[in-house]
Image (cartoon, rainbow, N blue to C red):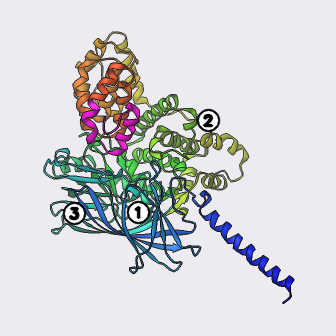
Amino acid sequence: MNLFDGQKQLFLFLLLIAGAIMAGGCQSGPSQRPDVHSYSRPDEVVVRHLDLDVAVDFEGKTVSGVATLRLENKTGASKLYLDTRDLEIRKITLDNGPQTTFKLGEEEPFLGRELVVDFTPETKMVSIEYASSPQAAALQWLSPEQTAGKKHPFLFSQSQAILARTWVPCQDSPGIRMTYNARVKVPAELMAVMSASNPTAKSPNGIYNFEMRQPIPPYLLALAVGDLEFRALGPHTGVYAEPQVIAGAAFEFADTEKMLVAAEGLYGPYRWDRYDILVLPPSFPYGGMENPRLTFATPTILAGDRSLVALVAHELAHSWSGNLVTNATWNDFWLNEGFTSYFENRIMETVYGPRYAKMLATLDYQALLKALQELPEKDTPLYIDLSGRDPDDVPSAIAYDKGSLFLRMLETTVGREKFDAFLASYFESHAFQTMTTAKFVDYLEKNLIAGDQDLEKRLKIRDWIYGAGLPDNAPVPTSDEFKLVENQIERWKTGTPAGQLDSNDWTTHHWLHFLRSLPQSLTPEQMADLDKAFAFTKTGNAEIACQWLTMSVQNQYHGADQRLGDFLTHIGRRKFLMPLYIALSKTPQGKEKALEIYRQARSGYHPVSYLSIDKLLGVGSSD
């Protein structure tokens, strides 16, 4: 070897080292994070299965134990990047053996802290001993007084969008799918249920074992613990609720099996074995949460007349759009909710008929127009870049109703038969996979448009997905039933007393259209006339109550003041809370009243609700 050859080899050696250093530097950069809301790097190492062994402590308000993550190491990496938020990490072991070192990153708003675990390329399992915080944003701990039975406490989780990390260390991105098993220890008098195989009776020792065989994204991890009973609704469906609620819930959800059969007839087999519903206490912040095998539902849909069960159809539809084919990131949220809202209406049409479905579609269209008036233009495309934003802060009718209307436009343009075949094929070919907006557009162009340039121009796909507002080819839903309602409104506006209007056989949907179609400005006398005739202030229907109470605030109708306070104190569903607090906050007197009510009510709200209202009213937990 001469000197030149030695220098050359040294140069090549240094070049290789520099390349490795640069590659390592690239690994730590944002390019390795395909989801801006997750610290995980699934292109390097991905979690394929979770074994969870935890205990639920109601006194300490913690979930603690061990989460064992089974890994697929794609690159020979020696570090695992996980998401945590307000978790106490006690120790971490590898392959049921030695402890390893780890590091927690700096706390970031709503993202939490990155957990970096050291391991070897041969490591198959990482076991993390941890405990959640009493302030975990996914978990709500209810006192006995906050439940229907008033005797036992209650716990439920809400992991969507990025809150799974507050009670389980995980790769908290919708683009990652894993199976899981869980062993959960709870007080013996209570029952635990999860988004997995579930018991139908209480365990004498308070220990429950769960299995989820189908791979799910972490936001579908769900746990609830309370004094629960189960009642079957059909061969594949049932309902869980507190004993005081179970009979009413079983009546309300009697058509669930029919909905399941209708859904399968539309878009293919149900892949999750069972479809059950859990009715939660009133503080649940959403109408429903589509946790696979066990939808979590608000009691505000227990209207006594099955008039609000479109929510069940919606959560059931998520078993295809969302749970089966999942948005890859929260920027693609409309792929979950727009498809589901469209599918929901098709289920309702199949079970209850076209006239009923048209009323629902028209109400959704009204909500969409209202959202387009109120939202900033940047939040009105279907695809929204949520970098730097908490996905829980951007809920609106856009993803749901504009997304649904987009699919309705596709259906009406190409024909229902062709579009149904396209959707069924879409769900089948992408089952248990994730979907981006760009990938969907490509699939749509190849499989529905198929080179038809005239059709492509008429569809205006990119205007819908990436453009603000509504394109000019948007269909406008109409309802003959609502024309009857509008005739009665005209009679009232021209002097007919409310009590003489023909409102026999009106459903919740007729009444909502009636209230939404009244003039925005009404006198206290007009409000009192309507209230005397139809007892809106006393209604037990939460949808009608919210609409009426919002109108009462806007028109300073004080006959509803007491009900307003009671409603805001006992209902935790954010859909109802936000419009009422917004209406109150528009005047100094209303803002003062809102703060007075909120100080009493806040402790009964889930973090998803109270964090939004904190921002609206400019207050916090100490105010």
- The percent position of residue 324, horizontal first and vertical second, equals 47, 60
Question: Extreme left residue here?
Answer: 151
Residue nearest the viewer, comparing 190 with 314 = 190
- Disc marking residue 169: 1
User: Majority secondary structure of the magenta segment?
Assistant: helix
Q: Tell whether position 616 is magenta.
A: yes
Q: Answer above or below: position of 542 versus 147.
A: above
Q: Is mark 2 on a helix, strand or loop?
A: loop
Q: Tell whether position 183 is magenta.
A: no
- On the picture, is 212 further left or further right than 203? right
Amino acid residing under circle 1: Pro
Name the image quarter holding the N terminus: bottom right
Instruction: Give the CA separation, mark 1 to mark 3.
Output: 20 Å
Q: Quadrant of residue 611?
A: top left
Can residue 478 be seen from the camera position used here? no
Question: Extreme top residue here?
Answer: 495
Q: Answer above or below: position of 474 versus 311.
A: above
Instruction: Give the CA separation, mark 1 to mark 2.
Output: 46 Å
Residue nearest the viewer, comparing 285 with 492 = 285
Q: Quadrant of residue 237?
A: bottom left
Q: Nearer the viewer, mark 3 or mark 2?
A: 3
- Disc marking residue 473: 2
Q: Over which residues does the magenta segment extend?
A: 597-623
- For label 3, the crowd category at 10 Å Cα-Cα, with few meaning under 14, some 14 to 19 and many 20 or more, is many
Name the image quarter holding the C terminus: top left
* Earlier sequence position, callout 3 versus callout 2: 3
Q: Name the residue under label 3.
A: 186
Q: Answer above or below: position of 320 versus 43.
A: above
Amino acid residing under circle 3: Val
Q: Tell me the residue at 30%/40% (across/down).
A: 572
